[in-house]
Amino acid sequence: MISKSKALKGNSTKVYIKTFGCQMNKLDTELSIGSLAKKGYSFAEEEKDADVILLNTCSVREKAEHKVYSQLGSLRDQKEKNPKLILGVLGCMAQNEGDKIFKRMPHVNLVCGTRMFSRLPELLDEISAGNKRILAIDEDGEVNFDRLVTQRQNRYSAFVSIMRGCDNYCSYCIVPYVRGREFSRSVTEIVDEVKKLADDGCKEVTLLGQNVNSYGKGLSGKVTLATLLRELDPIDGIERIHFITSHPRDMTKEIIEAVGELPGVCEYLHMPAQSGSDRILKKMKRQYTSAHYRELVDMAKSIVPGIKIASDFIVGFPGETEEDFQETVSLLNDVRCQNSFIFKYSPRTGTAAIDLVDDVIEETKKSRNHIMLELQKKISSEENIKMHGKSVEVLVEGESKSNAGRLIGRTRQNQIVAFSPPEGVGQEGVTSALPGTLVNVEIVDSTDLTLFGDLRDFTLNELAH
Ligand code: 5AD
Ligand code: SF4
């Protein structure tokens, strides 16, 4: 997933940030844009117009790092033509690769790790002042959560970091090494930020953390994700609260009950299973069994009507036999996820699994990946057909990119809905008045990825929000 920084007003040095990877990276980009804007930096629409190009990177799979190296390679020409251009690598890959990046790509000026984002403005100033290369990957660097709430890509929806890092050390995963130890923000700080976002017109927040279910560890008193949700739910103006990502080992009945009881908390769990084989789960150091995962999903479905589950799966983990893989297939079949992200195992230096022989051949990884993708597609299509004739609440996002004049938005369960605007709304309504409104849509058709519907009970007066 790649997203681009938006242009902001200003006339000094123009920065362009390209973001790779997860939601956490998107938030880091947003926080960086905020801190750079505070110091008077402005932002370019396109790479070619920028004085500073920053790549905010991901290290979870080797392919993600290859992609960045190849982008850096293709920026060499631009740098040769304009030697004043500042080129920086930020985030997970900067932390992971360190000065290896300078060795492979000598035209890079800045390597800035995951705990150094708040120093970006001064690091860029130093480079402009003549320091050709800076490596800033201090592992003890303080993460700064300070945020300019007005500096957001999306007016009505925002990510909020509730914790950083991860202490789980799943055997395949590089995150604990590049993002550091787990650290929870205080409830007061989070409540404060969400209130400010609400005052600035935000209606939806997504609480972010590598393992949000263990939120509160290390804070004084009995603070859990469930107690945090209870503090956030009453905040005026916030209509929807999501939280990602959940770890099955740390999911509790208390959290599921909060999802069921609190009107603002959405009926959606992104809870990666990774595998359906207990033997593989043990090798992955996930600390739960597939039976436990099934029990959690059953509990969630019985306590929270209409809840949808999303998952991640890794296929081709070292030692995964056909039998192990079939257990993963049957887990997906039983749980019937709304969607899942399926990855081929990618060995990462520094993780525990690097000592295991990567013995599932590429062809098998590919075919298992394909089988899981097809199964997920079939389940999603079948589940979406069950929605036909139902009315769902949709938070409007804007005009459909593939179908001009149509609107798209999301349900509380994170499903994409496309629908036609009511007659008389006009282009202005489609592009700026309707986005951010909650509307009711009756579903009439679907594919595996999208629900299609018609607006219901909508009057043009509602646009006066
Ligand atoms: N190889 C393949 N997939 C991985 N993930 C994490 N590490 C690896 C790896 N080494 C997947 C997991 C995780 C998601 C973010 O990325 O499924 O949930
Ligand atoms: Fe990686 Fe496991 Fe932590 Fe998720 S919980 S970030 S997979 S170590």
Image: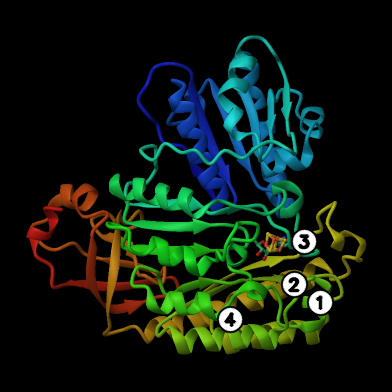
The circle drawn on residue 126 is: none
In three-dimensional space, the C-alpha distance between marks 4 and 2, rounded to whole angstroms, equals 24 Å
The residue shown at (77%, 61%) is 169
Q: Earlier in the sequence, mark 3 or mark 4?
A: 3
Identify the residue position indicated by label 2 in the image. Answer: 286
Q: Earlier in the sequence, mark 1 or mark 4?
A: 1
**Element marked by disc 2:** loop
**Element marked by disc 1:** helix
Relative to 133, is 82 on the left or the right?
A: left
Identify the residue position indicated by label 4 in the image. Answer: 375
Some atom of ligand 2 lies within 8 Å of the CB belonging to the residue at label 3: yes
Nearer-the-camera pick, 363 or 133: 133
245 up-or-down from 252: above or below: above
The circle drawn on residue 282 is: 1
Identify the residue position indicated by label 3 in the image. Answer: 169
Some atom of ligand 2 lies within 8 Å of the CB belonging to the residue at label 2: yes
Amino acid type, callout 3:
Tyr
Disc 3 + disc 4, Cβ < 8 Å: no
Amino acid type, callout 4:
Leu
Choose top left, top right, bottom left or bottom right for residue 439. Answer: bottom left
Q: Nearer the viewer, mark 3 or mark 4?
A: 3
Q: Position of residue 282 (x, y in %)?
A: 81, 76
Q: Earlier in the sequence, mark 1 or mark 3?
A: 3
Disc 1 + disc 3, Cβ < 8 Å: no
Relative to 103, is 194 on the left or the right?
A: left
